[in-house]
Image (spheres, helix red, strand yellow):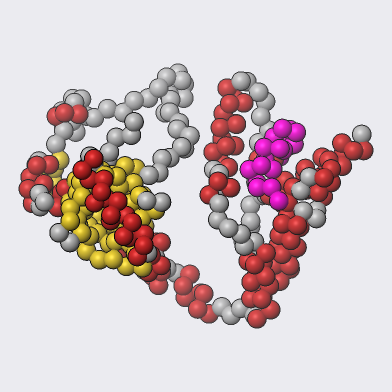
Amino acid sequence: MARPTWSGSISFGLVSVPVQLFTAVRTHSVRFTQLHKDTGNRVRNKRVDETTGDEVAYGDIVKGYEVADGQYVVVDPDELDELDPEASRLIDIEDFVELQQIDPVYYDRAYYLMPSGDAAAKPYKLLAEAMEQAGKVAVARFVMRNKEYLAAVRARDGLLVLSTMHYADEVADPADLEATDTLEQVEVAPRELAMAEQLIDSLVTDFDPERYHDEYQQRVTSFLEAKAEGQELEVTPPERDTGGVIDLMAALEQSLESAKRDRGGEGTGSSRGRDYGAMTKDELYDLAQERDLPGRSSMSKEELVEALGTSDASSKAS
């Protein structure tokens, strides 16, 4: 059973609802272990006293703030809580705003906000349904792990979802980026713009998160499994864009034709009655893996469609 990251209450007006915060996103990255290159033994990090060299137990470690070079004041977590004990356990809603008014660049981490105890269920549901009916997002602040967070709380399928947000002064101003000056000097031709809009229109679809997978992790996992079994591995490095000058119109036309072929299934992948163009890249890669097509790990979707079509043609010929 999942354990809450934080427990407290969410407050709107005079209503206070006991809640718990649960992480909404879990990572599944491949984890590597550090090994000694000569012995193959695992390397472990130890907490060591900088002066004495003695190892320090975790329970003997405290927080310190450097006030001068090499001089620290020790801070106890309870002392920080005492600075604002109420805020430490309270998500205080300050405003309600339209969702589209919040630029996604401000979002950080997502959490599920769940009622804590049976008595909290009704006021929790009241807040969730009222927010869903109003179509508004709550902007709130709360303290977690000795840091005050700005947060957006919204209703989703009868539940409250909290996303921590960056403060305005934490978000970089794009005007400070070097490329901004270059962009201001560039002009786009009407024909190029029309072609780019056509390309976008040809790729428009409904968002389905199940269609997207971590393809790099899948390739790494397959690579590691094969290596563990002692197989000879063929790794083809992907072609890199050299960053040279390109014919923009030619590239747009080629991309548009490729997109039409993929969406319409008119390319070589439609042989054998299979519409490879309508398949996701993950599905294409899995099929290419089944057929043991060489160089598949570095292929684009278009290249996978082409390679599978060629494979079909070869099978027919034989």
Which percent across, then down, holds residue 137? 33, 62
On screen, 244 above or below 114?
A: below
Name the residue nearer the viewer: 239 or 263: 263
Locate residue 204: give its quadrant. Answer: bottom right
Which percent across, then down, holds residue 280? 65, 47
What's the residue at 71%, 37% (across, down)? 287
Q: Residue 251: in sight, yes or no? A: no
Asked if residue 10 lies left or right of residue 279, the reply is: left
Residue numbers of the magenta segment: 278-295
Q: Residue 3: in sight, yes or no? A: yes
Query: What type of secondary structure mainly makes up the magenta span?
Result: helix
What's the residue at 22%, 39% (across, down)? 117
Is 293 contained in the magenta span? yes
On screen, 76 above or below 224?
A: below
What's the residue at 71%, 60% (across, down)? 259
Asked if residue 190 lies left or right of residue 310, the reply is: left
Which percent across, then down, holds residue 217? 54, 38
Name the residue nearer the viewer: 92 or 240: 92
Which percent across, then down, holds residue 42? 40, 22
Is 50 contained in the magenta span? no
Asked if residue 135 lies left or right of residue 6, the reply is: right
